Amino acid sequence: MRTLKRLFQFISIYATALGLLWGVKIVYGFSDYLIPPPLEMLQVASQNGLLYVKAVLDTLAVAIAGHVVAIILATAVGLVGRLSTWPGNLTRTAAYNLQAYPIVAVAPIIFLFLGDGLASRLLIAAMICYFPLLLSFIGIFAKPVEEVEHFFRITGRINWRLELSIRTFENLDKITTVIVGSGTMALVGTIIAEFLAATNGIGYIIRKALYQSNLAKILVALFLIGLCSSLYLSFIETIGGWIKMRLYGIRSSPYNQV
Amino acid sequence: MHIACRNLHYTYPGADFPVFSNLDWSIEGPGFFALFGLSGTGKSTLARLISGELSPMQGDINIPNAGRVLYTHNAERIPGWDTVGAHLRSVTPASKIPLLTTILKDYGMEAHLESRFSGLSMGQKNRINLARYLVQEFDLLIADEVLANVDEPTRNHILERLKTLFPQKTFIYISHNALEVARFSQTIHVLTHGSTAGTNRIHKITGLDQQEGIEIPEELVQERVYAILRSAASTSEPRL
């Protein structure tokens, strides 16, 4: 249901944007060369569809891998960042300062060192979604849930694992939202990497289409990117929802309460 | 258990005025004592200072026999991943399981053990929270508005049973309900606003200490209620 809703939302937005584009074309009398007619887009889709689908799946695979790496890394560093001792303070300060720097700007250096293959795309995807994840995780892990933790603290039962479980559980909604948001960023990071220098993926296809000034190819590629990202994000949301349902218990789930 | 605070001073970080300065206060347990006062007089702050959650900026708090002090308040929740029963079993020492069973029966909560905490009413949540504290090892339990959402007959029953089940323990019961503290407390310690910020003082009023199965005449209760309310509304020094 959630997946269908996301797909419907994306297709509606895509169709509206396309309609506006064609409306502008008709009003200002732009040529078919500048804005392709629907028929040309269909031809591009039928001729290159399979190639584009493979490319977008390649991009998606790299984005997912980068996203997973970023989540694992952000969790690990977030655990250090929650500490009130010097390693925690150092991690927090470093994270707040580094996140202010546009990571895309260092992408050329990554390509210089790692070449234009998978490693560069993966690293850029991971780096772009890593810092928002890290800052959120540090915030969540470091902030006490006083009304739940109080009992365990005053009775001497609290330990770091329990503390972490409570804070994670109480912030599951926030965590799911951050992970979904960073999923989009991972996809953006991968495509940017492919724009810049990679030789694979849908970003690379768009870059080639740009050199040919072929808007039809770009529009078809954008459609596939939107389709895949909608599916991926709704997949993450479904997993998050499933975890919450399992933890909250179906009968007393907050989703079932008014 | 003897608790004595001497020359206590506390200001919250960032606040312009202290909650207390030069506060002297003591109680001699065991027994059921009440801390009463208008909002903002520092009842919860004093409770948190005694329990060690806050540290006084000046002065000291003596609990000579180093007894175990617990502090609970009515906003507490149990983790949402467990049912109420599973949580209670996990935090109750094996030797206290029979006591837990008795308390849950007394509080009418036996039928709710398979529920999640979020599925309970506010009054039920209050009772479950209090129950889990009562089965811990403690010498002094400071209960801050812990029965605020419980209906009056049930609340009265809980307080009576508390005194029967734990005659050797010390309770400091924080409440805004003058009738309740007048009826059940051994002594009511009324925190009053001072004439200037931080000069709060505590007046002691003897309570009626109602026990299980003993009725106290309403006139006596009313008399204490008036005394408590008069005291709470007074200032410790002439207003400037």
Image (cartoon, coloured by chain):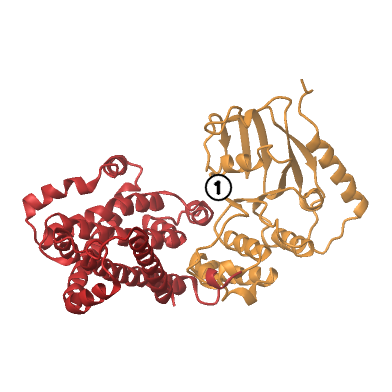
Chain colours: A red, B orange
Q: Quadrant of the N terminus of chain A?
A: bottom left
Which one is nearer the viewer's eye here, A151 or A93? A93
**Amino acid, disc 1:** Gly
Residue A135 horizontal side relative to residue B158, left or right: left
Q: Is residue A186 positioned above or below B22 on the image? A: below
Question: Where's residue B168, x and y in %?
Answer: 66, 54
The quadrant where residue A159 appears: bottom left
Q: Is residue B82 left or right of residue A185?
A: right
Residue B238, percent across and down?
Answer: 79, 23
Camera-side residue: A97 or A39?
A: A39
Residue A15 drawn at (x, y percent): 38, 69
x and y percent of residue A241 in the render? 43, 71
- Quick check: can you spot residue A219? yes
- A15 versus B43 height, above or below: below
Q: How many dots with numbers? A: 1
- Outermost residue toward the right? B219
Quarter holding the C terminus of chain A? Answer: bottom right
Return the residue nearer the eye: A21 or B33: A21
Residue picked out by circle 1: B67
